[in-house]
Image: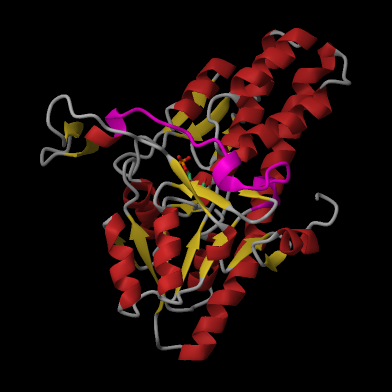
Amino acid sequence: MKINGTPYRSVWVDENDGWSVHIFDQTRLPFALEVMRLVSQDEVAHAIRTMQVRGAPLIGAVAAYGLALALRTDAQDAALEDNAAMLAATRPTAINLRWAIERMLTHLRPLPPAERAQAAYAEAARICDEDAAQNEAIGRHGLELLRAIADRHGPDRTINILTHCNAGWIATVDWGTALAPIYMAHDAGLKVHVWVDETRPRNQGAALTAWELGSHGVPHTVIADNAGGHLMQHGQVDIVIVGTDRVTRSGDVANKIGTYLKALAAQDNAVPFWVALPSTTIDWTVDDGIKEIPIEERAAGEVTHVAGRDPQGKVTQVQITPDGTNAANPAFDVTPARLVTGLITEKGRCPASQAGLLSLFPELG
Ligand SMILES: CSC[C@@H](O)[C@@H](O)C(=O)COP(=O)(O)O
């Protein structure tokens, strides 16, 4: 996507040295757009853990480059396996991370150590190119849903879309998942407006989705996380589109905490609830998402404190709970397939079910 007219991806290799890896530090957004240079697998792991890079597809792609960085110093079998395991353990819920590391290992294990670093960079680049292409295709398949709404209501009526968390281009290598159809609809001249859930506790909606949509000129309004149900009751949401960190083979969807409540409200109000994902987010080994998907538990400080900019322009953290208050911070929840209208993938749309997924991906099941 473009920033001030210049096209960017969310991760790239330094074009001068040919090996260091660049990302945008997402913890600095929306107040500063800062490029970070990563030079070791430890720095990559730290960036993933602290959410300087985040979003299921992007952490997979960045971890692949993390392995490439590690192989520059030691490409022997033991180092390959140790570094892969260390990177795969940085965050537990998004399956793309494990998928990317497994793909890298499958590619690299048969090679002689002397060839591994170069091959790792090439494979990581392929993962990035594929992710960008898959998300663009998701955009096209999701755009058809938005066009159908426009056809029903006429071109003058604004299409109101609600989204949760950030599933835009900064959460992927390019385009985004849930936001890709919205960018395409906006570019095609459809009148769209996005209700952006703030997405406590880390505020990915308020900070990242609002920044992305604003930079692209897409009309949007940030709402408190609890406002969505009310808006749906009053006919102000035509469709919900969210991303996901893991979809089970039966169509259960893990996504940022609070997604499940939006799906419940959507069902109660007959609002379609769609989930956008590349096939790299499907975990074919898991059936029951509630029982089997590991849910990341993050630090209580993310709940007891919020970051923001003070009137002097300084970005700071403030405490919002009494001293010593206990806080729990499950970072994801699982929306059962029965609440999901359908899945939008790079191969097209399907019901959130094993049969639906197999109809699009018979070779992966
Ligand atoms: C295209 S990204 C889809 C999901 O990864 C996104 O909605 C999400 O939940 C991200 O969680 P985060 O904890 O910010 O990495």
Q: Residue at x 30, y 55 (%)?
A: 225
Q: Nearer the viewer, residue 114 or 329?
A: 329
77 part of magenta stretch: no
157 over 279 or under it: above or below? below
Q: Residue at x 72, y 28 (%)?
A: 121
Q: Nearer the viewer, residue 66 or 321?
A: 321
314 over 283 or under it: above or below? above
340 over 114 or under it: above or below? below
- With 221 as the anchor, is 126 left or right in this view? right
Q: Nearer the viewer, residue 308 or 33?
A: 308
Please say whether residue 69 is visible from this viewpoint: no
296 part of magenta stretch: yes
Q: Which residues are magenta?
A: 278-302
- With 97 as the anchor, is 48 left or right in this view? left
Q: Position of residue 348 (x, y in %)?
A: 70, 66
Q: Position of residue 47 (x, y in %)?
A: 47, 26
Color encoding of the figure: secondary structure
Occupied quadrant, residue 362:
bottom right
